[in-house]
Image: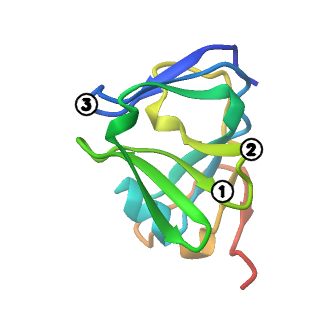
Amino acid sequence: MSDPMVGGGCLCGAVRYEIAGPVGSPVMCHCSMCRRASGSAFAVNAGVRAEDFHIVAGADLTREYESSPGKVRVFCSRCGSPLYGRFVAHPEFVRLRLGTLDGDASVRPVMHVWVGSKAPWFEITDTLHRVEDDGS
């Protein structure tokens, strides 16, 4: 778990946030939507209680995109940085994009998910737990 008052923001610096509570265990998501949203082989996300997550600058620049029913992705409208996601059915949590943190939240990835959808050009070389698909 992380120390209180971890901060972060988007690439252009217009959107800033603070986290006044723990950051959960990060997961590396290899689904096609996370790959497209990140422009990389995977996205690294970690849960944060919504009550602990506060946008302190640039809230008016954030935009939401419902990428699948009930799954909302939030990004900076100026630079396009993906910041966090949320599930409509679980408003008590946000899924923070760890690449937007300013420093070290003292958490480390615990698993790879949806590796059945991973980019064919990327090889997973660590020994973390892997989840192949969502079972659908």
Q: Is residue 25 left or right of residue 94?
A: right
Can you tell which mark lies on residue 12? 3
Residue farthest toward the front in the current orientation of the protein: 60
Calculate the distance from the C-alpha at mark 1 to the C-alpha at mark 3: 29 Å
- The amino acid type, in three-letter code, at marker 1 is His
Question: Could you say whether the residue bearing mark 2 is in a helix, strand or loop?
Answer: loop
Quarter of the image that includes the C terminus: bottom right
Q: Position of residue 80 (x, y in %)?
A: 29, 47
Label located before the other in sequence (1 or 2): 2
Question: Could you say whether the residue bearing mark 1 is in a helix, strand or loop?
Answer: strand
| Label 2, residues with CA under 10 Å away: few <14, some 14-19, many ≥20 | some
| Label 1, residues with CA under 10 Å away: few <14, some 14-19, many ≥20 | many
- The amino acid type, in three-letter code, at marker 2 is Glu
Calculate the distance from the C-alpha at mark 1 to the C-alpha at mark 2: 23 Å
Question: Could you say whether the residue bearing mark 3 is in a helix, strand or loop?
Answer: loop
Q: Position of residue 16 (x, y in %)?
A: 41, 25
Image quarter for residue 96?
A: top right
Taking depth in this image into account, of 126 and 20 the one nearest to the observer is 20
Q: Nearer the viewer, mark 2 or mark 3?
A: 2
Relative to 31, residue 47 above or below = above
Residue 40 in view = no
Q: Is residue 17 left or right of residue 40?
A: right
Q: CB of mark 1 within 8 Å of CB of mark 3?
A: no
Residue on which the image places disc 1: 112
Label located before the other in sequence (2 or 3): 3
Can you tell which mark lies on residue 92? 2
